[in-house]
Amino acid sequence: MGDEKRILYNNVEQKISWNKKNEPPSITPKVSLHPKKGEKRLGLQSYLHLSMWSFNHTASNSPIFSFIGIPGLKAAQIWISIPFCLLYLLAFVGNAVLLILVKAEQTLHEPQFYFLAMLALTDLGLSLSTMPSVLAIFWFNVHYIGLDACLTQMLFIHALSSVESGVLVAMAFDRLVAVCAPLNYTRLLTHSAVACLGGAAVIRGATLVAPLPFLLRTFPFCGANILSHSYCYLPDILNLACGDATFSGVYGLVFVLFTFAVDVVFILASYMKILATVIKLENQDRNWKSLHTCACHLCTVFVFYLPLISLAVLHRYTQNTSPILFTSLSNTYLLMTPLLNPLVYSLKSRQIQAALRKRFWVQRVIAGE
């Protein structure tokens, strides 16, 4: 690059001079909002774009990030927002109904349904964490977010994802005890034990993720600062940091190993033990009933971990992946999971189905009166 470089930005000619110390460029527009005699007048829209561009490049400690949305479909964003809104609405309604059922129905006051309520509450939190940026993109065409807001969103997304993974481990332990040690089920999984398992998942998620925003806050950011998702995701932010992000990358890897990797290993070990126990049972009807009680949890595990692992692999090992693939996986990871979890339990759990029929019938009778 030479000493001086001419660029055209929104029909405004700017002069950018680079010094030998690689300091931020000095931007000198040849037009102004309040022109003198002989100068051109800068339009308000161009002035705002220029101010944001200048702020993004000169204030590296307070950068502005931009969301890519869905590449190639910018003209259809208003139509894409309709299914997104419906999916969010269904996720909110489905998880809220599960919470109401578990609280209202005495037959659902069991450890496995308490864990299900924790899962529904976590899914509501995940949906609320991503909804502002997603709807801002598709409804209001707002693609920008500040550093502090981005790091806050990232904190909630990763902390709640860790909590959900911990809840899935607790649900696997519940199924392990129910199948392998049914006589000790009520003794082991008391209300206090359920509360301790849920609290441990929350504390682990909060403490492991909490240092990340403070670490990332110290890095300078430069370049276009374009995020490849509709929300702030840790690998995305690390890729945009200009400084040495080795420590943060290692810490992020440790976080993944101590949460998702450990959880997956425990869940697999639990189901291997469950399968070995079920095979030894002589009663085939009991075999089928035991496996059926695990079907809902297995479906939830696959729905949560498959998009998560696929997204992590794409960020780690691929460089030229299609942006549409990134967008599809990221939306599946944080939008379809809260939607499918209540649907899976409504279709597979007989207790949930009975509670739904009971509540629906009571409401219909009251309405008929």
Image (cartoon, grey):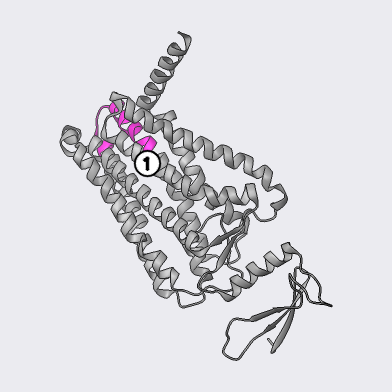
The count of marks equals 1
Q: Is residue 346 visible?
A: yes
Residue at the far right in the pictured view: 38
Using residue 22 as the reference point, say whether residue 76 is left or right of it.
Answer: right
Residue at 37%, 25% in the rendered image: 350
User: According to the image, label 1 marks what residue?
Assistant: 119
Residue at 32%, 30% in the rendered image: 103
**Vertical comparison of 219 with 83: above or below:** below
Residue at 54%, 69% in the rendered image: 63
**Vertical comparison of 105 with 83: above or below:** above
Q: Is residue 189 visible?
A: no
Q: Quadrant of the C terminus?
A: top left
Find residue 167 and report its horizontal and vertical position in percent: 33, 45
Using residue 184 as the reference point, say whether residue 325 is left or right of it.
Answer: right
Residue at the far bottom in the pictured view: 20
Q: Main secondary structure of the magenta part?
A: helix
